[in-house]
């Protein structure tokens, strides 16, 4: 399962409305090599499911990830932090052994 905090839900709805993204779209979360800690999170809107996608819905938000990324994201929570010192979207990931200061990359 991938969880979605209320803060992330609210911001996702704002972004979908401003980008005129329809209800057929979902949030695609993935993990790629890179960043200062070795692995980086990626988020984007998508409307195409791939054969090995894992599909979750939490707090009214549909989140889709590929199988490899799901191994890193299992039981994580997507949050949003705004304001002057906010990080934007970030994952609270119990699988990460360490993460960088910006919260955009991690290692296991």
Image: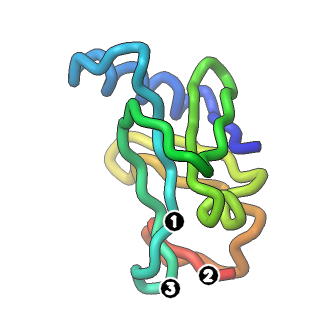
Q: CA distance from mark 2 to mark 3?
A: 6 Å
CA neighbours of label 1 inside 10 A, class few (<14), some (14 to 19), many (20+): many
The circle on residue 107 is 2
Residue at point 63% right, 34% down? 5
Q: In the orientation shown, which residue stands out farthest toward the front?
A: 51
Q: Which dot, 2 or 1, sits closer to the camera?
A: 1
Asked whether the beta carbons under mark 2 and mark 3 sit within 8 Å of each other, the answer is yes
86 vs 60: above or below: below
Label 2 or label 1, whichever comes before in sequence order: 1
In the drawing, does residue 75 fall left or right of residue 68?
right
Q: Quadrant of residue 23?
A: top left
Q: CA distance from mark 2 to mark 1?
A: 11 Å
Label 3 or label 1, whichever comes before in sequence order: 1
Residue 99 x, y percent position in the rendering: 58, 76
For label 1, the SS is strand
The circle on residue 31 is 1
Q: Nearer the viewer, residue 57 or 6?
A: 57
Residue 43 x, y percent position in the rendering: 41, 49
Quadrant into which the C terminus falls? bottom right
Residue at point 29% right, 16% down? 17
Label 2 or label 3, whichever comes before in sequence order: 3
Residue at point 65% right, 58% down? 67
The circle on residue 38 is 3
CA neighbours of label 3 inside 10 A, class few (<14), some (14 to 19), many (20+): some
Residue 24 x, y percent position in the rendering: 42, 18
Q: CA distance from mark 3 to mark 1?
A: 10 Å
Number of marks: 3
80 vs 74: above or below: above
Q: Nearer the viewer, residue 20 or 13?
A: 20
Residue 107 x, y percent position in the rendering: 61, 81
Q: Which dot, 3 or 1, sits closer to the camera?
A: 1
9 vs 96: above or below: above
């Amino acid at each position: 399962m991938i969880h979605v905090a209320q803060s992330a839900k609210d911001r996702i709805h704002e972004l979908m409305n401003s980008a005129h993204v329809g209800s057929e779209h979902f949030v695609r979360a993935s993990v790629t090599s890179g960043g200062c800690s070795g692995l980086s999170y990626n988020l984007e809107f998508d409307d195409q499911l791939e054969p090995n996608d894992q599909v979750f819905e939490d707090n009214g938000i549909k989140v889709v990830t590929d199988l490899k990324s799901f191994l890193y994201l299992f039981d994580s929570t997507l949050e949003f932090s705004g304001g002057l010192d906010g990080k934007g979207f970030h994952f609270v990931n119990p699988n990460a052994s360490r993460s960088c200061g910006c919260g955009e990359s991690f290692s296991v």
